[in-house]
Image (spheres, rainbow, N blue to C red):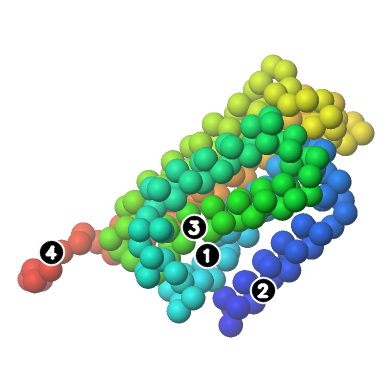
Amino acid sequence: MRRVIAFAAVLVVLVLAWTNASFLDERLAFSGHMALHLLVVAVAAPVLAFALAGTSFDPSPRLPRLFAPLPASVLELAVVWGWHAPAAREAVALSGAVFALEQAGFLLAGLVLWLAAFGGWRREPMAGGIVALLLTSMHMTLLGALLTLAPRPLYAPWLCLGGSALGPLADQQTGGILMLAVGGAVYLAGGLTLAARLLAEGPLRPEGGTE
């Protein structure tokens, strides 16, 4: 029942966030865009994955190649960095359809990665899941640092309107700080959770081995 409630709650939050006028207006604010991005990949995707993992609705045991942890991590990297390219950000800000495509890509890539790491709680790919989540934490941290420490805006000023008190550079830096504080931390926590589970289960014995 808790899984059903979590699944339904996340879907409601996503629908409200995607349809709320203030969020849509903030396609022109980088910090608002980043907050929505992190809501999708660092909150919604893992909660949905945990709600599905180990149930009959978990696709990862049936499609192990599609849900291999390391390729899933590479997919997440390509999606996240690709949509943060200046040309892609401009397209998202100008088109509701492209915005929808971006958000769907974030959710799908995040869900694939989290299910690849946690789906079915299979022991064998746990090490791969740990590496995949830690690599994702690293590239999220790198992107956040790039956005925060850049000496000038990486995007056109109209793409970083921010609030009334924020200029383009400050808006970009705020988005970078959000990425550092949330994006990197959530994936790091996921990797450490898997590592703790693997250590708790002890060494893997060969099949047919004796106690």
Q: Which residue does the image show at 66% across and 48% down from the upper left?
A: 102
Secondary element at tag 1: helix
Q: Nearer the viewer, mark 1 or mark 4?
A: 1
The first of marks 1 and 2 along the sequence is 2
**Res. 206 mark:** 4
Front of the two marks 1 and 3: 3
Which is more N-terminal, label 4 or label 1? 1
Instruction: Give the residue pinned by disc 1.
Output: 49
Could you tell me which residue is drawn at 37 percent across and 69 percent down? 61
**What kind of element bears circle 4?**
loop
Single out the mark in the foreground, 3 or 4.
3
Residue that numbered label 3 is attached to? 112
Helix, strand or loop under label 2:
helix
Could you tell whether 185 is left or right of 130 in the image?
Answer: right
Residue 21 place in picture, x, y as percent:
88, 54
Separation of disc 1 and disc 4 at Cα? Answer: 30 Å
Q: Amino acid at mark 3?
A: Val
Q: Is residue 174 left or right of residue 46?
A: right
Residue 185 or residue 48, whichever sits in front: 48
Residue 80 seen in this snapshot: yes
Name which residue type carries label 4. Pro
Quadrant where the image shows the N terminus: bottom right
Q: Earlier in the sequence, mark 2 or mark 4?
A: 2
Precedes in sequence: disc 3 or disc 4: 3
Residue 8's mark?
A: 2
86 shown above or below 121: above
User: Residue reaching furthest top?
Assistant: 151
The mark lying in front, picked from 2 and 4, is 2
